[in-house]
Amino acid sequence: MPLISSDTKGVYVIAVTPFDDFGRVDYESLDRVVDFYAEKGADGLTILGMMGEAPKLTQAETLEISRRVIARAGRLPVVVGVSSPGLAAIAEVSAAVMDMGAAG
């Protein structure tokens, strides 16, 4: 997947991360969210930012959500938020999501 650059344009939706009634990531709803944004014509997605509830997630959940959204988004570029209280974790997650095919 191409990386974001100064030539990147269009609408990149700030995607939510859905949870079930027990506070677990709702992966089926996540799939529906990605499909909805694609069907409505989004040019790309941004995930795991403020609306993506990133601080509530474990590193394993962050990686699984990233893997799932990048795979499901298909042609849509996905920008992944990699906030963390430590630089080592930021570097590790950043490298992992870029290896998965994140656009940024």
Image (cartoon, grey):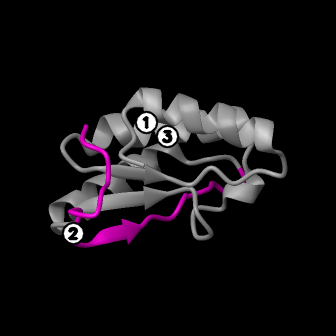
User: How many numbered tags mark residues here?
Assistant: 3
Q: Which residue is mark 1?
A: 68
Q: How would you rate the neighbour count of disc 2 (Cα within 10 Å): few for under 14, some for 14-19, many for 20 or more?
A: few
- Residue 21 visible in the snapshot: no
Depth check: 96 or 16 in front? Answer: 96
Residue type indicated by callout 2: Lys
x and y percentages locating residue 27 in the rendered image: 50, 43
Depth check: 78 or 26 in front? Answer: 78
Left or right relative to 66: residue 78: left
Q: Which residue is mark 2?
A: 9
Circle 1: element type: helix
x and y percentages locating residue 90 in the rendered image: 70, 43
Residue type indicated by callout 3: Ser
Magenta-tinted stretch: 1-23
Residue type indicated by callout 1: Arg
Q: CA distance from mark 2 to mark 1?
A: 24 Å
Q: Which residue is mark 3?
A: 66
Q: Is residue 32 above or below residue 42?
A: above
Q: Nearer the viewer, mark 3 or mark 2?
A: 2
Among the two numbered marks 2 and 1 on one chain, the one whose residue lies closer to the N terminus: 2
Depth check: 83 or 21 in front? Answer: 83
Q: Mark 1 and 3 residues: CB-CB less than 8 Å, in contact?
A: yes
Q: CA distance from mark 1 to mark 3?
A: 5 Å
Q: Is residue 70 above or below residue 79?
A: above
